[in-house]
Amino acid sequence: MEGGRVLMVLLLWLLVGLAGSSPPPEPVVCDYAYGSGTSGCTVSNAYGSFPDRTACRAADATFPRTEEELVAAVAAAAAAKRKVKVATKHSHSFPKLACPGGNDGAIISTARLNRTVSVDAAKGLMTVESGMVLRDLIQAAAAKGLALPHSPYWSGLTVGGLLATGAHGSSLKGKGGAVHEYVVGMRIVTPAPASQGYAVVRELRARDPDLDAAKVSLGVLGVVSQVTLALEPMFKRSVTFVTCDDSDLAEQATKWGNLHEFGDMAWLPEQRKVIYRKDDRVPVTSAGDGLNDYIAFRSNPTAALITARVTEDLLEKNANAIARCKAAHKMVSSFETVAYGFTNDGHLFTGYPVVGFQHRIQASGACVNSPEDMLLTSCPWDPRTRGLHFYSNAYSIALSKVSAFIADMKQLRERSPLAFCGIDAKMGMLLRYVKASSAYLGKSEDSIDFDITYYRSYTRGEPNPHSDVLDELQQMALRKYGAIPHWGKNRNFAFEGVIDKYPKADKFLEVKSRYDADGIFSSEWSDQVLGISGSPIIVEKGCAIEGLCVCSEHLHCAPEQGYYCRPGKVYTEARVCSFQPN
């Protein structure tokens, strides 16, 4: 009961919607500064920890403000044949995409490349620098009467970062919900021979086949300088959330995306409920000035975050599934009561539908854009507060296979219902629609992206009491149903053999060899996931507990704590770390 009360206190703070919040920490931190650069640097992500929990170091970092400075930074690295990676303003990718490897690599940050280059309202074209944050982009477009048709739900991503990982919203209509489908031009700085000054700017236009490589590239082709997007005249959306039981989810999942342009679903497996999002465009003349200020993306008092985390640790470590499930029920009910942070006029929620302009509905992220308040408040996952700490797994399953996967997941739920309370506590499993893409590293067929967030310990090697069920679920998706992991999320084992799931991978690798023959922008991690050399799997004691491997022997789990390598309960080909008392 105490755990539920503490979590409710945190929720009340969330509902207040505090105006202040310390901005997130810089992902690149260096010891010394000189001119426009620095030396002795570490690189992290917004969550303060990579899947393998190791630190990422670089010899130096540069922060170019212009394309000319960007070219100079790439040329310097290419001339010295040094590894170099690109870091964004907030660095929200879970894997080590921004880590050059070793201690001698270089970092190029796009944090200061954040301006609008041009807007052609008549043609619906907007060119921005790659370091521009999504929130600033959609606001700048709106000021000219234009709208980015689709975007991820979190507005703190940069344009270059979200393109590199194929980030998306939810839609099967038109070109779909991925931002890269609206890219019609790009300027990218790549290494070059000495005769060309060691770096060149490549300008790609709409019909250039190389654009299909560059618009989802994992950052291994070079540094994107500018991006041109095809926008639409401003429109409005009408949003209604409807909660139903999940008895017909397998059938509804195959239909919902064709019924609603921006529709998605949040599945609460333990509660046997689905929150359906009915979300469609309406004429710009429709009444309403609604706002999406999603609760979980608001600022939080640091004291409340710490208290909530301590409570969550107690619930997890004591394997108190009943108490955790009760807390999850209260949390979901409270979110539903306040419409998940949606309001009809920017202040109050008076009822559905919520109708508002696209730029006020499509994404949110209030906690990321606030003045410094000495960490009195922060984003919920700010690593400086040791608040929320979690795994984020996301993988896309072909629409034709989704019904069978959901049926299998329900079987697993029947075997271990309480194991799914951890998913419900994070507002369920988010199902978003992703349309087939021409991008070489994009989805090859219409799919549903299953996005799952759940508890992660701050202590290396400490098991999640229900990790066997959660890992079986992911192995089932990846191996039985051929799921494709999201490039910017997931743990190491999800990426084993992933490149074989992309029919056009050879075309991407051919472009990569032309753009960066010496692999300046490649790293050990990128070579592993692209199938060039090595494997993302790390085999060591406790590796399966951390998601670095799939267990094949008990040592990969935590036998000293009672966790042994066992077959899955429904997908018996899975190998998971299961608690076996005595």
Image (cartoon, grey):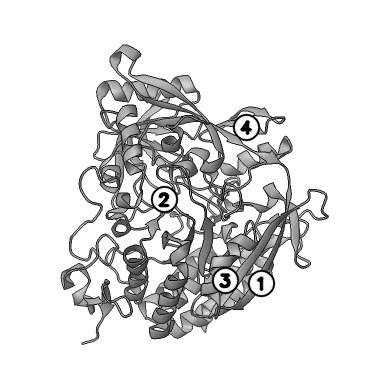
Position of residue 439 in the picture relative to residue 53 (left or right): right
Q: Nearer the viewer, mark 2 or mark 3?
A: 3
* Front-most of residues 307 and 56: 56
Residue 32's mark? none
Q: Nearer the viewer, mark 3 or mark 4?
A: 3
CA separation, marks 1 and 3?
13 Å
Element class at badge 3: helix
Position of residue 371 in the picture relative to residue 344 (left or right): left
Q: Measuring 57% from the left and 71% from the top, which residue is drawn there? A: 252
**Mark sitting earlier along the chain (3/4):** 4
Image: 427 above or below 35? below
Using the rendered view, name the quadrant where residue 122 is placed.
Answer: top right
Residue 503 in the image: x percent, y percent? 35, 47
* Front-most of residues 297 and 3: 297
Q: Amino acid at mark 4?
A: Met
Element class at badge 4: strand
**Mark sitting earlier along the chain (1/2):** 1
CA separation, marks 2 and 4?
25 Å
CA separation, marks 2 and 3?
28 Å
